[in-house]
Amino acid sequence: MESQALYSWDPLIRIVGRQFTSEKGTPPKEVSLVPGEWLMKFHGNREILSEMGNVLQIAQISRGKPSGAWAACAGLMLNQLWREESARAVKSRTSRGGETKTDVLKFRPFTRRELLAKTVKSDHDVHSILNDQKGRRDRISSYWKDAIKHLTQAGIIGYYRELKASRSSDWREEWLDQPIEIRPKGEVLENALKINSAATTARRRGRARTTADKL
């Protein structure tokens, strides 16, 4: 893909409407926002996809327990990683149970350390739980299993497989760094496939130009 100039002095967003309360001096209870001219310039450009996935879908996952907090954090990180790495993912066709073959993307394996790096103490920080005296391996594994179940039921994860972990003297480090194959489904997969297709086309054009220059 060609590089894009992503800078501007224009407003990022514009306020187009306010709904005030009856009490003077109080902030408006509703504000309507629209993208500024700079953002609208790139509207619909698949080479500049600021985010993927339904954030509201993830926000509906309750964070009251470690499993829910981990699911929400992992879901947000997965959407970011899938977006960033769609261009380099490997495209293939697969079918399950005799169904029609569909396009899928195989991403590099991610680790729990990557997916849970943004949890904070109020959201059941993974490191605090791992270092807690009650943080037994079976309990930690149960939290993670339930977190993946949340994401699967929400329609975010389409494929999940844990790979062999590198041996470590500390099971916590081994657990955090275990490689896991996780693939998207639904709208996220569709957007990722579009990014991958555009990147593949750009690479082919680049190789064609290089070959032509050598002739």
Image: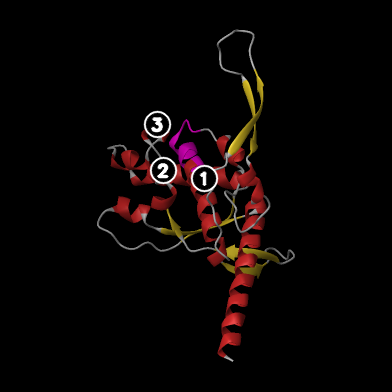
Residue type at mark 3 is Ser
Q: Secondary structure at mark 3?
A: helix
The residue that appears at 56% across and 36% down in the rendered structure is 59
Q: Which residue is mark 3?
A: 122
Please, is residue 43 above or below residue 61 in the view?
below
Residue at figure coordinates x 59%, y 8% from the top left: 24
> Do the CB atoms of the residues marked 2 and 1 lie less than 8 Å apart?
yes
Q: Return the mark for residue 118.
A: 2
Question: Can residue 135 be seen by looking at this rendering?
Answer: no
Q: Is residue 115 left or right of residue 36?
A: left
| Camera sees residue 80 | yes
Label 2 secondary element: loop
What residue range appears in magenta?
63-72
Query: Where does the N terminus fall, quadrant-wise?
Result: bottom right
Residue 141 on image: x %, y %: 41, 47
| Residue 91: % across, % down | 61, 68
Depicted 118 relative to depicted 103: above or below = above
* Alpha carbon distance from label 1 to label 3: 17 Å
Q: Main secondary structure of the magenta part?
A: helix
Q: Quadrant of residue 37?
A: top right
Residue at the extreme right: 100
What amino acid is at disc 2? Lys
- Which one is nearer the viewer's eye here, 16 or 152? 16
Residue at 48% of width from left, 64% of height from top? 108
Where is mark 1, residue-wise?
76
Quadrant position of the C terminus in the picture: bottom right
| Secondary-structure class at tag 1 | helix
Q: Is residue 118 left or right of residue 104?
A: left
**Does residue 84 belong to the magenta stretch?**
no
Residue 133: x %, y % from top left: 27, 37
